[in-house]
Amino acid sequence: MSLSGSMTAHVLLGLLAGGPRHGYELKRSYDEHLPRARPLAFAQVYTTLARLVRDGLVTPAGQDQAGGPERTSYAITEEGLAGLRAWLTAVEPPAPHISGTLLAKVVVALFAADSATARDYLVAQRAAHTGRLRELTAIKADPATSLSDVIALDYAITHLDADLRWLRTTLERVAAHTREGSG
């Protein structure tokens, strides 16, 4: 079983742990339970299912043609359940490298352009982050928002908040650097 690094495969295994489903149902369930995640294409669902069958983690569980095209349902195997349990209990290591487009742009602006370019970028990025934070907070406040959505929104809001703190601190550092350089 070689699923290391395949989040999609593990998520599909998790969805199948609730009972047999066909690809369309898996896609719909993915969209329902991970509404704010990167979209999952139908082709990716079927490609992943084929790999899971090949690896013995999922098995075809029957055909269904209720009012539409024939669809194969899939069920998780014991080996698939063991792989899912291992994935669910493995602690994710913190990112080993400090990277990100936001960081790269600020560093490049400081050293390839000037402090004013970095400052202008930081201010514009802060405004974009603040707008997105307000948008997500409004969605979260809606009583109709599902638990899955609230959990995803909490995750996104926490990351935006951390970015905003970093943007504020970096703006202060750039301003202090500019003052020291011109003084």
Image (cartoon, rainbow, N blue to C red):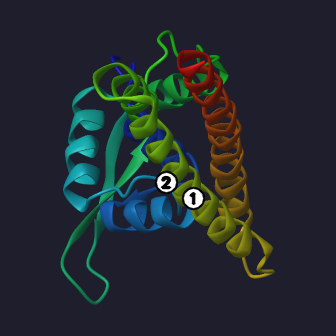
Q: Compared to 154, does 122 lie above or below?
A: above
Give amino acid for label 1.
Ala
Q: Residues within 10 Å of mark 1 (few under 14, many from 20)?
A: few
Which corner quadrant of the image does residue 56 belong to?
A: top left
- Label 2: which residue? 124
State the SS at label 1: helix
Q: Which of 86 and 96 is in front in this view?
A: 96
State the SS at label 2: helix
Is residue 96 visible in the rendered image? The answer is yes
Q: Compared to 13, does 6 lie above or below?
A: above
Say if mark 1 contacts mark 2, CB within 8 Å. yes
Estimate the x, y position of residue 102 in percent, counting from the top left: 44, 35
- Label 1: which residue? 127
Estimate the x, y position of residue 22 in percent, counting from the top left: 35, 62
Q: Quadrant of the C terminus?
A: top right
Which corner quadrant of the image does residue 32 belong to?
A: bottom right
- Taking the spot 65% from the left edge, 33% from the top edge, the residue there is 166
Q: Residues within 10 Å of mark 2 (few under 14, many from 20)?
A: few
